Image: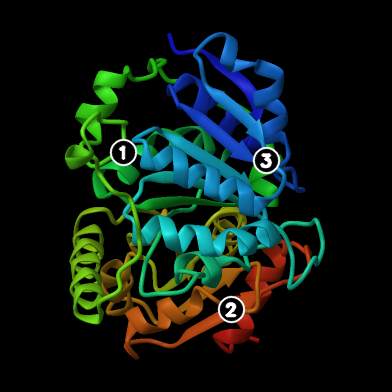
Amino acid sequence: MAEKILLKGNEAIAISAIRNGIDGYFGYPITPQSEVMETLMKERPWLTTGMVVLQAESETSSINMVYGGAASGKKVMTSSSSPGISLMCEGISYLAGAELPCVIVDCQRGGPGLGTIQPSQSDYNQVVKGGGHGDYRNIVLAPASAQDMYDFVDLGFDLAFRYRNPVVILADGIVGQMMEKVELRPEKPRRSQEEVISDAPWAAVGKPSSRERNIITSLSLEADVQEKFNHKLQEKYDLIQEKEVRYETYRVEDAEYLFVAFGCSSRICEAATDLLREEGYKVGMLRPVTLFPFPAKVVSDMADKVRSMMSIELNLGQMVDDVRLAANGKCPVGFYGRQGGNIFTPDEIAEAFKKFNNFE
């Protein structure tokens, strides 16, 4: 029988990293994700699995250490919160431009600027749309539970190496801080150097002859070469959109109205859906698990069946743009959100739903 223990979402990230044989973690403390590094320091995996755990001097240093580890074919990761992710954006763009796999955890807090240390979902545009410079995309997973936080480390590295691309686990302060029962999956050992070379033949692994060395860079001095490379990246992103869409639905079989929500908002929307069902409104919910690739086709298909949709987010409306593009005018698309660390209740969402649909 699988072992189950109580963990915070942030702690689940750390425990999963150790049990999945991750080679290295480089990070810098910032609320509300500091428990990731704190748990790793407490567990001391360098004594058991050989995992490197290092507190860098800044978020900028952290992401560049990730670049170095990823260039060597290692499974490396970092974690931060919203202002720290802003500082990492240049490095993330470099990782995407060099096609290097890694996992980045973003436990969002309210902004802009230093903002608050309270939960938020306002990094959607920063992370899902790219954030840094250039036409690149991150694969983005949106956890809604401590179990997701645990599971998405393994899934994240699988996707990162499959597509040679950064993967972001876009969490929020609620999911990071909440404590839940987590089922621990079987442990995976760290890969040997021979396995690293086999898994990442493109990596710089210290081959003896200069003619055999793999040069890891995102630099190109010729416009035509860079344009061709960008077209190659777009083909990869198109393949990701075709193959890797993930989502969950709740009470949509006979739904006439649809909530679209991710992360902690989806859990609150489940309760709002139940409240409205009790009042006779046929409401369902769609939870995007991948924010890139976004489940646009599913939203489009649902738009053919429902009277309206509402995007529910802890921001001023960022995912709603993607919902409206996918719905393509087939039905009205509304929005309800809160900011600054204020969390909506199921009752608030239900009232916003009634107002948008002119039921009051």
Crowding around mark 2 (Cα neighbors within 10 Å: few <14, some 14 to 19, many 20+) is: some
Please determine whether, in this image, residue 233 is positioned above or below residue 104.
below
Image quadrant in which you'd find residue 251 = bottom left
Q: Residue at x 64, y 37 (%)?
A: 10
- Which kind of residue does numbered mark 3 sit on? Ala
Q: Residue 259: image x %, image y %?
A: 49, 68
* Residue 306, quarter of the rendered image: bottom left
Give how far across and how far down residue 243 sits, in percent: 20, 54
**Residue at the disc numbered 3:** 56
Determine whether, in the image, residue 139 is placed left or right of residue 60: left
* In the depicted structure, whether residue 30 falls above or below residue 1: below
Residue at horizontal 26%, vertical 53%?
244
Residue plotted at (35% across, 49% down)? 100
Q: Which residue is disc 2 drawn over?
A: 317
Q: Is residue 282 visible?
A: no
For residue 307, say whether it is visible.
yes
Q: Amino acid at mark 1?
A: Ala
Give SS at disc 3: loop
Contact, CB < 8 Å: mark 3 with mark 2? no
| Nearer to the camera, 95 or 314 | 95
Q: Of label 3 and label 2, which has the lower sequence position?
A: 3
User: Marks 1 and 2, Cα distance to the nearest angstrom?
Assistant: 42 Å
Residue 214 in the image, given as x and y percentages of width and height: 25, 44
What is the basis of the colouring in this image? rainbow
In three-dimensional space, the C-alpha distance between marks 3 and 2, rounded to whole angstroms, equals 34 Å
